[in-house]
Image (tube, helix red, strand yellow):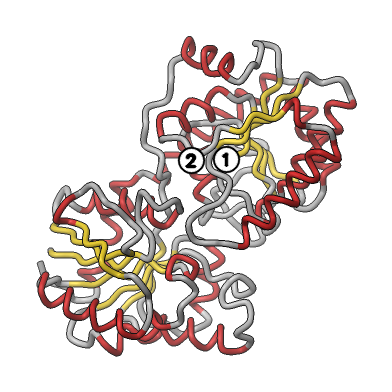
Amino acid sequence: MRIGIIAGEYPPMQGGVGAYTQVLAEFLRQHHEVVILTSADAIPSEGNHVDAHIKRWNMRSLFTIRRWAKANQVDVLNIQFQTAAFNMSPAIHFLPHIVRHTPMVTTFHDLRYPYLFPKAGRLRAHIVKHLARSSNGVIVTNHEDRERVERMNVRHICFAPIGSNMLATAPSADERIAWREKIGAANDDFVLAHFGFINRSKGLEDLLRATATLREQNLPVKLLMIGGRTGASDATNVAYNQEIDALIEQLRLEDCIHWTGFVDDSAVAAYLTASDVVVLPYRDGASFRRGSLMAAIHYGCAIVTTTPSVDIPEFLDGENMQLVPSTNPEALTNALYKLYQHPEQRNQLRAGAALLAKHFEWHNIATQYVDFFRQLGVAG
């Protein structure tokens, strides 16, 4: 099968959808041919497999995609859809009408309407529904989006969770100590880690307030902020970062926070496993769509995150993660304090997360894609 993927972002552009696309393509290529068309801002290393040609995702770009698909003789086109990755342009929603003779499958990564087209009003729901219903099939990556797409009366839906974009090997126990020393953490320090870009949905204010309270209670807390602060897709993150810096100064936390900046996958793996607890207090609850959560699960970390907004049977409170109410710094503080007091509970959460990680293995995800393409009648 010859698979064409349309991605608004791609490494080295910083963003979860681009990283997801790169790993997915790697696993699909084990048995199939894969070509990718992406933004001109990307400088891919895969040579002829990736074409970084699109300067603007406008209506003209749709005809570029059609010519590209024909030239590459693809059997199926897959849009890796997240609006921010296409520069908030509505044009991509009409691609199925331009590329009529090639089966098209859209993978939705994030259908939270307040985030999509914030000034579009009722148009936002209509235009997303239009893309979903005009595609030959839709792949959703999380429970929330599955519920939304099912309400759109889409005929063919596949639920394929995201895997971790971080595939580097975790460090050994001795290396873990060395990585803690890099951030100035002693063996008896309580290292809390946060991973991922900073934006309003991440609940970082709650983490900062919890950290400040734990310090007031004389816990030897260090806060490890892993990764770049802003991604390539969302300019609003910059202003929010300034608010976070002001809160850090107000809470007098400058001396206990270590910022890694953007680091490679092996460093992310090392920092995650060097921490005592990974804290991800999402405002809208834990979800399969959160790549930072998938990474923490992948490396078998002790995780504290927020209660999902929908039922997710795979997330077991107290077994593979500790769940707390969102926007509740007091509850977060209490959960972290208990885990500081009881290292055996942290070990239990690590074991549970390692078991849960098997649910998100990439070869299974790639198989789900191919099986769905074939279900839709794609040959090859």
- Residue type at numbered disc 2: Ala
Lower sequence index among marks 1 and 2: 1
- Residue at 61% across, 26% down: 348
Q: Residues within 10 Å of mark 2 (few under 14, many from 20)?
A: many
Percent of width and height locating residue 61: 30, 79
Percent of width and height locating residue 179: 52, 18
User: For residue 187, which quarter of the picture?
Assistant: top right
Out of 310 and 115, give the one closest to the viewer: 115
Q: Which residue is tagged 2? A: 295
Q: CA distance from mark 1 to mark 2?
A: 9 Å
- Residue type at numbered disc 1: Phe
Callout 1–callout 2 Cβ contact below 8 Å: yes
- Residue at 21% across, 58% down: 50
Where disc 1 sits, the SS reads: strand
Q: State left or right for residue 269 relative to residue 183.
A: left
Compared to residue 260, the image places residue 101 above or below, namely below
